[in-house]
Image: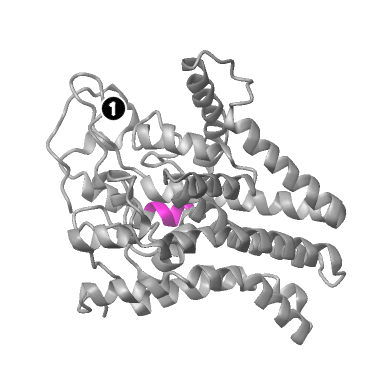
Amino acid sequence: MLEKVPSRIMIALKKVLFLLVFAVAMLPYDAWQTMQETGQWNLYAWWPLFVIFGIVPIVDHLVGTDSSNPSDDEVARLSGQRWYSFLTLMVVPAQLAVLAFGAWVFANTDRFSLVGQVGWILSCGIVSAILSINVGHELIHRRNRLENWAGGLLYASVCYAGFKVEHLRGHHVTVSTPEDASSARYGQSLYRFLPHAYLHNVLNAWKLEAARLGQLGLPALHWRNELIWWNTISVCFAVASAVFFGWAGLVFYLGVSWMSFTTLEIINYVEHYGLHRRKLPNGRYERTTPAHSWNSNYLITNMGLFHLQRHSDHHAFPARRYQVLRHYDGAPQLPTGYTGMYLLALIPPLWFRVMNPRVRAYYQGEEWQLSAKQFEQSARLTEPASMG
């Protein structure tokens, strides 16, 4: 339906549609209002989750995909427009509002049963993930200090500040190789992937920061270690939650943080599952290209996620701002948007049934790449993978 819309019209339309992220931010408030009107507190505690994982995937397929790309002239023009930076920066107060409002509701109502409490934490957690994790990811890639620090603050708001360091200096360097804990292997289930991703990404962030300080002749435990500052901010968030909202506020904050950074790792699992960079004869890996990330062009989720689903272009050109990320026909394509893929990843047998044939088709003729062990031992460069 959207494929016939001229690119310039789609670009103008998306300039407005990126505001959808603020509709996501309003979901907890909308749920609370409905709770009061209907008296169904436990039911509507789950409303944001139902919208994001029930309604959005259906709307995604009804609206369809968008493969429009900006021209070179449009890239230069769009990249310099402050509107797009303003949108991402405005997510910071929106995230803080969601955390404060969610904690206030959780701590000040006696209408929730345990089912309602869990639903409210998970609902606010998925909204927080879209705001803090997704938008934080966009901002930490910016060289502008205000934007970069805003991204760090968003990650600190959900106790995962180490991602700022590990993602930029770790993941983008080792993506789609055995060294990267955020790149899932072929045949690896989400539940095998998550524990390793949690541990490695936290520890590797500290190792990378210690290495950076070592090059400056400074010890790891130095005031210039940015992880100390970001994690201190996370502790301040936790303390503030307990001070203002009691133990219930602290439980809410920690639960929302867990849901947020777990969502990050689930999306990491989706974005690179089964894809590998080939090893060159010199022992190094080939350059990262659009072939090393799964791409999805479903318009609605892309608007709510600031084009995060154009992940193939992001890894090939990390400095590109979200508004000018491009679609590549040759990049491996997901069968639906991230909301649908998130649910699929939670059920490994269904995930393997849907995704393994796509990975095998992509590496047809290079089946050796499907084995992580063979991949690690291989030191040969082959022709580019089939784009099937």
Q: Main secondary structure of the magenta part?
A: helix
Quarter of the image where one finds residue 188: top left
Q: Tell me the quadrant of the picture where the N terminus can be found.
A: bottom left
State the residue at coordinates (22%, 38%).
367
Does 365 sit above or below residue 34? above
Check the image and report above or below for 34 versus 20. Answer: below
Q: Is residue 170 left or right of residue 159?
A: left
Q: Residue at x 40, y 57 (%)?
A: 308
Q: Is residue 13 visible?
A: yes
- Tell me if residue 150 comes above or below residue 327 in the rendering: above
Residue 137, image x, y percentages: 47, 49
**What residue is shown at x 48% (from left), y 58% (from top)?**
342
Q: Amino acid at mark 1?
A: Gln
Q: How is the structure coloured here?
A: one colour
Residue 155 position within the rendered picture, expressed as x and y whole percent measured from the top left: 58, 46
User: Most extreme residue toward the bottom, as rendered?
Assistant: 37
In the rendered structure, the answer to whether residue 288 lies left or right of residue 269 reads left
Q: Residue at x 33, y 27 (%)?
A: 373
The residue that label 1 is drawn on is: 374
Image spot of residue 330 (x, y percent): 19, 54
**In the image, which residues are magenta?**
348-352
* Extreme residue in the top direction: 217
Q: Residue furthest left?
A: 383
Q: Is residue 77 magenta?
A: no
